[in-house]
Amino acid sequence: MSVLTAGLSRDEALKLLKTYNSDPFHLRHGLTVSAVMEWMAGDLGRADEAEFWALVGLLHDVDFEQWPEEHCVKAAELLGDAGCTPEFIHAVACHGWGMTGTDARPEAEMEKVLFACDELTGLIGAAALMRPSKSTRDMELKSLKKKFKDRKFAAGCSRDTIAQGAELLGWELDALLEKTLKAMQESEDAIEAAVAANT
Ligand SMILES: [Fe+2]
């Protein structure tokens, strides 16, 4: 059994996400990052922590729609009020390290994975929309690498943050791209089902 506890159930986390987010784009992002984090936990031999990783992914941007100026700081307050544990709050807050007002820095492997994958899932999602299939399933790594290098494409997805995330993890950038693409491909059905049920 995992030693990590979030302090709330998946249903409660979803309810909290929807309390503070109504934009389908934000809901899709939370559900996508949640699925990717859950996949990563399994892939990295942390299956016992998969629920925690998934819930951190789900709620990592809980404050962003309503309090973009206080991103990660407001989240800590909202999550504290909702009964989340200090380790859960730290995991959420530290994904804004160096970019928001939070002092929390990614330390645990899970925190580094979130930091590295957050923007990257946006890039992969935008690249999928450009394809005739509108899917990640037939996307090859070399095509993703091209999109990564083309900084005008999905310019809002910070390449610097993604590269910094790979460095924090001690992974080659290509390994991060490959793993996250695989996570999105293998989770695509689950993500679409969750999006359909919650938006
Ligand atoms: Fe995010």
Image: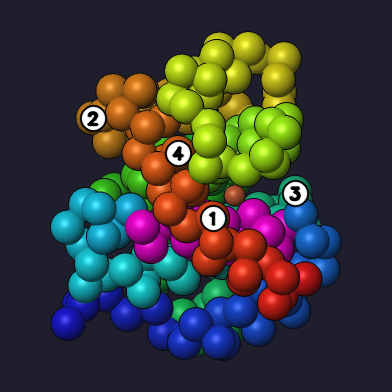
Q: Going from the N terminus, do you reach mark 1 or mark 3 first?
A: 3
Query: Is residue 31 depicted above or below 137 in this figure?
Result: below
Circles 2 and 3, Cβ within 8 Å, touching? The answer is: no
Q: CB of mark 4 within 8 Å of CB of mark 2?
A: no
Residue holding disc 2: 170
Q: Mark 4 packing: few (<14 Cα in 10 Å), some, or many (20+)?
A: many
Magenta segment, prevailing SS (helix, strand or loop): helix
**Label annotation for residue 188:** 1
Q: Read off the residue under disc 4.
A: 181
Q: Is residue 171 left or right of residue 145?
A: left
Quarter holding residue 179: top left
Vertical placement of 14 versus 74: above or below? below
Q: Does the magenta portion include 33?
A: yes
Mark 2 beta carbon near ligand 1 (under 8 Å): no
Q: Are marks 4 and 3 in contact (CB under 8 Å)?
A: no
Helix, strand or loop at mark 2: loop
Q: Where does residue 62 sit, x and y in percent of width and height?
A: 64, 65
Between label 4 and label 2, give the one nearer the viewer: 4
Give me the C-alpha separation between circle 1 and circle 3: 31 Å
Crowding around mark 2 (Cα neighbors within 10 Å: few <14, some 14 to 19, many 20+) is few
Q: Amino acid at mark 3?
A: Glu
Type of amino acid under label 2 = Gly
Tell me where residue 199 appears, x and y as whole percent. Answer: 77, 71
Residue ID at (36%, 74%): 51
- Which quadrant does the N terminus fall into? bottom left
Label 4 and label 2: CA atoms lie apart by: 18 Å
The residue located at (40%, 42%) in the rendering is 182
Q: Residue at x 53, y 32 (%)?
A: 139
Q: Earlier in the sequence, mark 1 or mark 4?
A: 4
Range shown magenta: 26-39
**Which label belongs to residue 69?**
3
